[in-house]
Amino acid sequence: MSASTPQTAAWSEPVAPSRPGRRGAGRSVAVVVCAVLGVALLGGAGVGGWAQQRDARRPPAAAAAYREAGSLWRETPVDTLIPPVLDGADAGPGGADRTWIRVALAPDSDCAPALAADWRAALAATGCTRVLRATYSDATRSSLVTVGLVFTPADAAAMAALRGHLPAPPGYGFADSQRAAWTASVVPDAPVVVYAVSAFTDGRTLESPRPAEDMMRKGATGAVAGAGLGHEAKAVAERMERAVHTLAAPPAPAGNPR
C-alpha cells in the first residue's frame, strides 16, 4: 500500500471589485470638463480669428461706400479726379479721336459762388457740399469745355430724383452767353453730379446752350453741331464720371487664404 502526500488547496478570501471614491470621480469629471473647455476656447479663438480676417476682406456695405464717396473731393488728388490731359479716342464726330488739355483749374469751392441760382434751386432737396471745376481745350484750341463735379450729402434716392431736372450748367472761364452744348448726369454709385458745357474759343455768343445729345444726333445742323461741341461736352463729362465711378467703387474682396 502506497502512501501519498495529500495536496493542500490554497484558498484566498474573495476580493470585492473596488469602486472609485467621490474624490476620484470629481477629478475625472474635472479633467474632462477642462479638456472640453480647452477645445472650445481654441475653436472659438480660431473662429474669431477667421471672422476678423473675413470682415477685413469684406468690402464696405453699399450704403457706406456711397457715403464715403461724398468725401472724394477732399481725399483724392485733384489730378486724379480732374486729370491734366484727357484721351478721347473715338470721341469726336464720326469716331474721330480727341485730346483735351486742362487750361484752367478752379480752387474747390462752396456751392453758392460756383453755381448759378437755378442750380442751387435744383439742389435744394439734396444739399451741396463742394464743387470742383476745370476747363479743357481741345488739341486744335478751337473749343473749350468746362467740367464740374458737384458733391452732395444726399442718399441715393434723393440723388436719383435729380435725373432729368438739372438745368444748363455755368461755364468757368467763359460767359454764360458763350455756352454751346451741355450735359449733366448723376453718378449712380456716388452722391455726385457731373456736368460739362462747351464753347468756342473765339468768344462768340450764342442764343442758348443746347443739350449735347441733341447736337450729337445724326442730321443735327448749325455751327455747334458741325464743330462737334456736343460730342466734346459729352465725352469730357463721361470721362469725369468714369473717374468718380472708379474711385467710389468698394475694393474687391481678397482671395481666400490657403
Image (cartoon, helix red, strand yellow):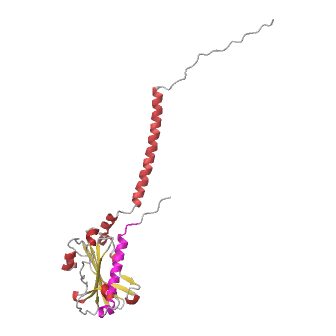
What segment carries the magenta color?
Answer: 222-251
**Quick one: which residue is furthest to the front in this view?**
219
Look at the image and say whether residue 7 sits in the magenta stretch: no
Work out whether 157 lies above or below 199. above
Q: Residue 66 appears at what percent x and percent y?
A: 32, 67
- Tell me if I can see residue 136 in this picture: no
**Most foreground residue, 85 or 218:** 218
Image quadrant holding the N terminus, namely: top right
Work out whether 192 lies above or below 216. above
Q: Residue 97 appears at what percent x and percent y?
A: 40, 87
**Quick one: which residue is furthest to the top in this view?**
1
Location of residue 150 (image quadrant): bottom left
- Tell me if I can see residue 51 in this picture: yes
Look at the image and say whether residue 228 sits in the magenta stretch: yes
**Most foreground residue, 37 or 222:** 222
Q: Residue at x 45, y 26 (%)?
A: 22
